[in-house]
Image (spheres, rainbow, N blue to C red):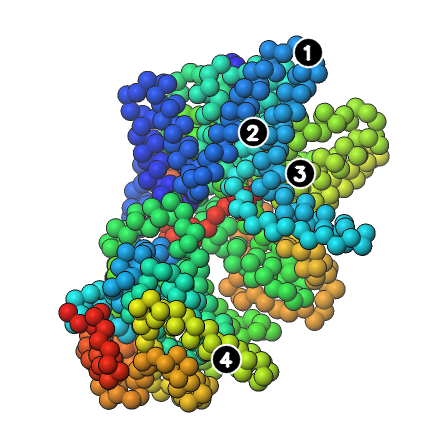
Amino acid sequence: MTENPNTTRKTPAAKVGPAAVMTALFFVASVGGWEIFWRGEQFRPSVRNSVGLWAMTRARVETEGNSVTTMIGSSRTLFDFNLESWEDETGQVPIQLALEGTSPVPFLSDLANDSAFSSLLVVGVVPPLFFFPGGDFRLEALEHYYSETPAQWLAQRISMPFEKVLAFYHFDTALPTVLKRQTWWPTREGVEFAPRDVRKLVDLRKTRQGDMWLRVDKDTAYAELAQSIWLDIIERPPPPIPPEVARAGLDTLMMTVASHVEAIRSRGGEVVFVRLPSRDRFREIENIATPRVPFWDRLLVETNAVGIHFEDFEELQNVSIPEWSHISSRDTYEFTRHLIDILRNEFEARGIQRAELYR
Amino acid sequence: MLFNSLTFVAFFAVVLALHYAPFGWRQKKVNLLVASYLFYAAWNPPFVVLLWISTLVDWFVAKKIHAETRIARRRALLVLSLAVNLGILGYFKYGGFLFENWAALMASLGVTYQAPSWNIILPVGISFYTFQTMAYSLDVYLRRAEPTKSFLDFALFVTFFPQLVAGPIVRPTHLVPQFETPHTANRQQLFWGLFLVTLGLFEKIVVADGFLAPAANMVYGSNDSLSFLDAWLGTLAFSGQIFSDFAGYSTTAIGVALCLGFSLPENFRFPYAAMGFSDFWRRWHISLSTWLRDYLYIPLGGNKKGPGRTYVNLMVTMLLGGLWHGASWTFVVWGGLHGLYLAVERFATRAFAGARVATTTVFKVSLALLTYFLVNLTWVFFRAQEFSSAWLMIKSMFGLSPDGKKLLPTVFVFEVTVTIAVMLLVHWKMRDRTLEDAVDSVPSWLFAVVWGVMLFAVVITQGSGSAFIYFQF
């Protein structure tokens, strides 16, 4: 075939090169300015809490799932456990699989069905997320793990070096997110109330260790903003579910969880449930919506699992919780150490010694 | 592999480096071919086999067709090529649809038939590369082109990564000759290619995914009757999203190819400034509309067999064009509406030929607005998952849901209104111009600022890494 001269692509008559150089300069200046702006807002480079990072962490189960403690749960599990403290106490860096705003039950099911997992599983329980349907905010991480393409696998690894040096390379600073979160937008009359987005609360490390963002800890106004957003969420009336449907749902949940715990136990693993601290209005509403006896206590009875409720241990209550729901990073090291001590005691009381909890 | 991913940035850097390294032309083509297979395999490695099947079948069949003089044998060979290509397409894309409809048909006749479950992954871009390879066999059969002499060139034509998964659908006569002689970009082409890549990514990441998709998803994710404003904003958002997503892909593909020294054909020409539907289809997904014209409409007889047959041909072409997009009756209705619009336009053009009013500005603007309005109605069927939700949306858009729900927060109302207004203005201003002419008409510094702002916006929007909509077709 001969080449058709009409297929030659047209370019502008004027030279594009000089404009490209100017573009490059403009780009460097604008991105530099953007980075400086966000650092001024106290953002620091941190690992993005992406599904790719979660998949990397989940992959550890396939090689270390027979010996290393694994954690699932919601944001409290992600923020409150200090993995360094855990490593200092036990010699192991736990596999941190908790995801904010998400029920751990599907992840419990995933691990129960994975024969590679036969170790200690710590399940963080935030009652409204654990006992009621709807806690699926980051559930896509699980699907991503099983359907991750080679391109996505590689993209995660290319992304991480940039995450370590750029403060603006963060989900919270993406342009549409920033626009959406501005307070100047008037409320549109007639639109059903929707809770505001939860703002940045944490900096993440490669191990998925979450450290409370310094601003939440130090800036009272910001902590109050976070509290007011929690109120948006927790004070919403629950969806109208007939009591018998809710009861049946809870019964099914308890049976499902118990069967998953049994499956893990049958392979030599063990499951512990941990109710992490909350305070003030958050704690009040949790206790009203999910009273301890029919929910938490029943969970422990049905699963015959070790359960640690922060209200039962003085040493787990002596922590700072600036925005009512997560422990300040200053206190997580000691908190985790106390928790490991309590876990050892609880297991020993049952005549069990879990190797994962000792050096 | 997605253009809007860091993986692609790294991949493209390596491909460019290899293409400008001191290798011979044959080696460079081998590099491009291997890169193209990697590009496809990065999504799902086993499906590369489908590319190999298409390549091998069409390579050998086209050679045989060319050598064969007996009409019946030529026809049989063509049928073999079409059967393999359409068979693969049918199996992966339409199998479940056919079984479901067969079951429905049987049920209507009182026969109980349980359709088998059809949980098959659709190979990305299968409709695009199937049409591209079919064009090769058809061109050889129709004696519009001779078979390619080099298997390497042909394999690269089937697989060339910039346009492999979402077009433009390139004809062999356009691309194969470019592989026969060494091609690299000069400095002007390289920079222009990089600009086109920036523009394409800006359309996809910032406009489609950043500003329009959230509103469109919110509106079309609702199962309620909506207020007039919400229904329209959601549909306008989708009209902008689908354009920016798809034109963004095409523009990036054209830019990537140009950086390597290759030319790909234009796929979009500011379609929302179209005056009428034949004009729209000269501006929207041009490579598909010309493919359907050349390989379906004209072989059916085109407009050469009388007015009645012309209308039938138009409708058949557009119905199949709709079905090409997806295995769902909603896509067929989308195509059918376009067929109907084209038929009505053809009738009106003949009936009112020479009318003076047609040359006035008021008429032209009105026609453009009417076209845009009607295009938006078709997008409802394209976007809605099922007819019930499409009807609900149409009712809301015609103000027939007085108690319709208000859904969109102010920020989305603002984003959609501004983005669509700017988009329509740009399309209108650029209606009879090319991008290259527009760039020549502004000072260099202004062009640099616009380019820089787009690049900056791409980076700070960050992107969700979502796939292009047309990958599913």
Residue A340: percent from the left, percent from the top?
A: 22, 77
Closest to the observer: B312 or A132? A132
The residue at the point 67 percent across, 47 percent down is B99
Name the N-terminal-most of marks 2 and 1: 1
**Residue position for label 1:** B70
The chain letter for the residue carrying disc 3 is B
Closest to the observer: A253 or A186? A253
Closest to the observer: B365 or A326? A326
Look at label 2 and name its amino acid.
Gln
Rendered image quadrant of residue B14: top left
Look at label 3 and name its amino acid.
Gly
Q: Are marks 1 and 4 on the same chain?
A: no
Secondary element under disc 2, as helix, strand or loop, is helix
Contact, mark 2 vs mark 3 (Cβ under 8 Å): no
Secondary element under disc 3, as helix, strand or loop, is helix
**Residue position for label 2:** B132
The chain letter for the residue carrying disc 2 is B
**Residue position for label 3:** B321
Rendered image quadrant of residue B322: top right
**Residue position for label 4:** A250
Circle 1 Cα neighbour tier, 10 Å, few/some/many (<14 / 14–19 / ≥20): few
Mark 2 to mark 3: distance in Å? 15 Å
